[in-house]
Image (tube, rainbow, N blue to C red):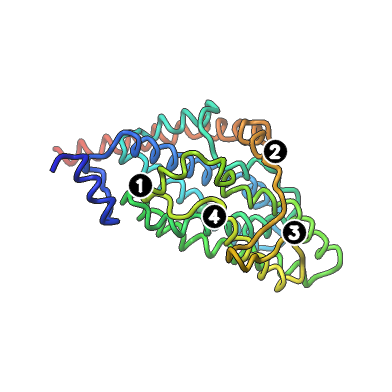
């Protein structure tokens, strides 16, 4: 069997492709793009929440939020490592990000305006991430699937901490309840758009599904997410800003109102409310961290030298 045949046999058997295996160039490229975009999203995603650590309303909330933001850094690291096994060095991925050449999830270009946003981000953004990522635990590329298993365990803690913030606010004063509702109103549509464009406008999805990278279509995952949050919002005693949500018994799917895909494209193209701020901050952090990378490299060289001697 040659490489191509072996690869096809692995995919047909729904088995895992490992870094040592031959793989088509398109498969490798798709994975590098998807995994690096995912890694960038974890790292850029630390900013809207990191911004609230110093303003958390109590020591307990501060500790929880700090742990959550730190988890996201860890997710970025697992994912950069998974992408590196495909032959693209992490330095290059970082360069592309800070040069504004790489994409990351459009959601992180929206501002976090109030403490309730920490709740809405955890509940809706991490919630959407879970819906998207649980099927990725079975992605055909081994290092990606294994990274996703660890990440998903932590994401469910993220979602619960967000939900709990909203629950406490919803049971608080009228002003607190209003703040929670306002945060949900602002994060609802962007979180639905996290699943990507509608199926008829998502040209790469079919190939990703044939390669067992993606298991469900964008619209399928979005509809599941809507079904999940439409029940949970009742526990909060709040509402979703979408009167068109309904369960379609014929298709077995949840439906929602129209989304502003023009806005989505604008944000992806770098013209969202916080794009330039997010990238500037990332660039600054990278430059400020240069001495840490140099020190770590010097330490590693010394360790190697000692081992050889
Ligand atoms: Fe994450
Ligand atoms: Fe998360």
Spot the residue most to the right.
174
Give the secondary structure at mark 2.
Answer: helix
Q: Quadrant of residue 159?
A: bottom right
Q: Earlier in the sequence, mark 4 or mark 2?
A: 4
In terms of sequence position, does the residue under pointer 3 or pointer 2 come before the other?
A: 3
Cβ atoms at labels 2 and 1 below 8 Å apart = no
> Comparing marks 2 and 1, which lies closer to the viewer?
1
At x 56%, y 43%, the residue is 200
Residue identified by numbered label 4: 129
Q: CA distance from mark 3 to mark 2?
A: 20 Å
Gap between marks 3 and 1, in whole Å?
Answer: 35 Å
Q: Give the farthest residue toward the front.
A: 250
Residue in the foreground of this view, choosing between 247 and 31: 247
Position of residue 110 measured from the top left corner of the image (x, y, whole percent): 68, 43
Give the side of residue 279 with respect to residue 54, left or right. Answer: left
Q: Which residue is mark 3?
A: 244
Q: Secondary structure at mark 3?
A: loop
Quadrant location, the C terminus: top left
Q: Taking 156 as reference, is 94 above or below it?
A: above
Secondary structure beneath dot 4 equals: helix
Which of the two marks, 3 or 2, is nearer to us in this view? 3
> Which comes before the other along the chain, label 1 or label 4?
4
Label 3 to label 4: alpha-carbon separation: 23 Å
Image quadrant occupied by the N terminus: top left
User: Could you tell me which residue is drawn at 46 percent across and 46 percent down?
Assistant: 76
**Residue 222 image position (x, y, % from top left):** 59, 55
Reading the image, the residue beneath label 2 is 263
């Amino acid at each position: 069997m040659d490489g191509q045949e072996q690869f096809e046999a692995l995919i047909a058997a729904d088995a895992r492709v490992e870094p040592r295996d031959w793989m088509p160039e398109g498969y490798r490229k798709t994975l590098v793009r998807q995994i690096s975009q995912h890694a960038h999203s974890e790292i850029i995603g630390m900013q809207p929440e990191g911004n609230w650590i110093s303003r958390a309303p109590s020591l307990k909330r501060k500790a929880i939020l700090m742990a959550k933001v730190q988890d996201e850094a860890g997710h970025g690291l697992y994912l950069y490592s998974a992408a590196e096994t495909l032959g693209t060095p992490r330095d290059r991925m970082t360069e592309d990000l800070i040069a504004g050449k790489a994409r990351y999830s459009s959601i992180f270009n929206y501002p976090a305006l109030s403490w309730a946003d920490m709740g809405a981000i955890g509940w809706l953004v991490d919630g959407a991430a879970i819906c998207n990522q649980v099927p990725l635990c079975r992605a055909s590329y081994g290092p990606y699937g294994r990274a996703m298993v660890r990440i998903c365990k932590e994401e469910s803690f993220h979602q619960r901490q967000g939900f709990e913030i909203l629950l406490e606010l919803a049971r608080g004063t009228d002003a607190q309840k209003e703040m929670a509702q306002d945060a949900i109103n602002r994060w609802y549509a962007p979180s639905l758009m996290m699943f990507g464009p509608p199926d008829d406008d998502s040209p790469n999805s079919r190939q990703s599904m044939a390669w067992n990278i993606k298991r469900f279509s964008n619209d399928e995952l979005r509809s599941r997410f809507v079904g999940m949050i439409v029940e949970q919002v009742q526990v909060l005693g709040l509402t979703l800003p979408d009167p068109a949500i309904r369960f379609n018994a014929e298709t077995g799917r949840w439906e929602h109102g129209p989304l502003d895909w023009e806005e989505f494209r604008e944000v992806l193209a770098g013209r969202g409310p916080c794009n330039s701020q997010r990238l500037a901050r990332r660039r600054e952090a990278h430059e400020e961290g240069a001495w840490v990378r140099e020190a770590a490299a010097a330490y590693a060289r010394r360790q190697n030298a000692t081992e050889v001697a």
